[in-house]
Image (cartoon, rainbow, N blue to C red):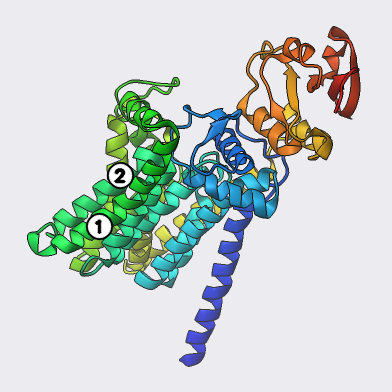
Amino acid sequence: MKLIKSENKKLFYILAIILGGIFIFLCTYNVANVQKEHINWSDEARHGINAYEMLKNKNFIVTTYGEKIDYWNLKPPLSEYFIILGYKIFGYNVVGLRAYSIISVILCCFLCFLYAYKKIGKKAALYVLAAFSATSLIFSYHWGRAGDADSLFILFYTLSVLALCCNKKGFKGVYLACLCFAFAFLTKSFHAGIIAINVIIYLLINKLIKIKYLKQLICCFILACFPILLWGILRYQYDGFTFLKKMFEYDLFTRSTSVIENHPGGPFYYFQYVFLNQISFIFIFLAALIIIKIKNKSTKKILLILVLSILNPLIIFSLVKTKIIHYVYCIFPPLIILSAYGFNEIFTLKNNYKYFFLSFIIIFSFANIIFNIQMILDLPNDYQLRTKAFSILNRNAEYNNQKIYVYLDEAKEDDINQDLFLALELAGDLKPKNGGYKAWNNSPNSYLFIEKENLDKISDYKIIETSANYYLLKHSSFKN
């Protein structure tokens, strides 16, 4: 009997290592290769620029873009701090930019695995690892392989949900959830409101909002608000209420009441995505199975927390006019945990049903994992200018703090795209400037990035570096 248990333990550990290794592979493979993993031009590039300029200017309160206060990214700077740490550890490159997102999603997976192992069982824990690897969106932009704020936010959201699930009596789990709210707010601003709503509903359901718990409730309030208040006071020292006002006006009210940045969507936008998502079919089926069959009261309370943590973001963000799909990515870790309870319940069914459902889930999950592995292996090569910036510049000290312009016909020599802007900063410690060739022509001590096909359109230059069809130029009269 002991031998059988020992063999089962060994098998569990072997499978856990294999499944965990697959997930880590999916999160990390080729992330350092800028030709394969080009910098996303939107949020990822913006956060990378904000973090780089924070570090360079040694101002860790105010986010800037092009050395001017940034009023486009209206989020507190916690995610930038972790990007800065990535830059310091891994260098000024794509790995440094994305390291904390990768670590965040791996930690998120590990926490869910650990919860399943402790609270549900070994089979459910293995299922959690497989489910994370089978969920394609984890390896897309705005989560595990992107240097923006979402991965860290999802980690805090998941940790807050698990803290409430583990809270049997008292307020320890609630305290942790409140602290997660504060950190989530410092990461994604008002998106953190869904954590606050989860906590309030939990307190109401468990009848904890009473005078006799006043001290504990005050402690919850302090943990949830003090870190945010401290940041707000520090931020106020630089531009008064300007940034904070814009946070409320644009990032909360305008985003909630109107469609901004061309992101429309109907009232069932998120529900359609979740219910029609391929892997969600399994999750929802298993979640329904456990909800129907469960009789244990303590488990029912946990399931209620998980269901609320899934429905709250779906409902709340459905009410917001601006619809962006990664707003609801945070529901997937609790959905996986909920489905893990359902997976464990399959083993209580009659053999015919049990083996049918197990075979279907294993085959379906394995097929999705193979698909995700193939997707990561087949990432397309990207030979755009942002890619070539890294191979041409290589952080040569000669370029430090020098101005650089870009000749791009398709951009009409106007603003440099954010991804290219970041690439020029990281790759050369340069100061990208808008204006294209004309502005470069009026700035004698500056550099110009240009495609080979446009060389005959300009004059008075020296070629400094080349890579494929791209060139780094300077004026003939350039003086260091």
Q: Read off the residue under disc 1.
A: 220
Which amino acid type corresponds to the residue marked 1 in the rendered image? Cys
Q: Quadrant of residue 388?
A: top right
Q: Is residue 207 left or right of residue 166?
A: left
Residue toward you, 472 or 149 = 472
Picture coordinates of residue 470 (x, y %)? 83, 24
Disc 2 to disc 1, C-alpha distance = 16 Å
| Disc number placed over residue 194 in the picture, else none | 2
Q: In this view, does 255 lie to the left or right of 392?
A: left
Q: Which residue lies furthest to the bottom in this view?
A: 2
Q: Could one spot residue 29 in this view of the protein?
A: yes
Q: Residues within 10 Å of mark 2 (few under 14, many from 20)?
A: some
Residue toward you, 23 or 245 = 245
Note whether 436 is above or below 204 in the view shown. above
Q: Is mark 2 on a helix, strand or loop?
A: helix
Which amino acid type corresponds to the residue marked 2 in the rendered image? Ile
Residue toward you, 366 or 132 = 132
Note whether 326 is above or below 182 in the view shown. above
Q: Residues within 10 Å of mark 1 (few under 14, many from 20)?
A: many
Q: Is residue 154 left or right of residue 302?
A: right
Labels 2 and 1 touching (C-beta < 8 A): no
Q: Earlier in the sequence, mark 2 or mark 1?
A: 2
Residue sitting at x 49%, y 63%: 110
Q: Could one spot residue 127 in this view of the protein?
A: no
Picture coordinates of residue 417 (x, y %)? 63, 24
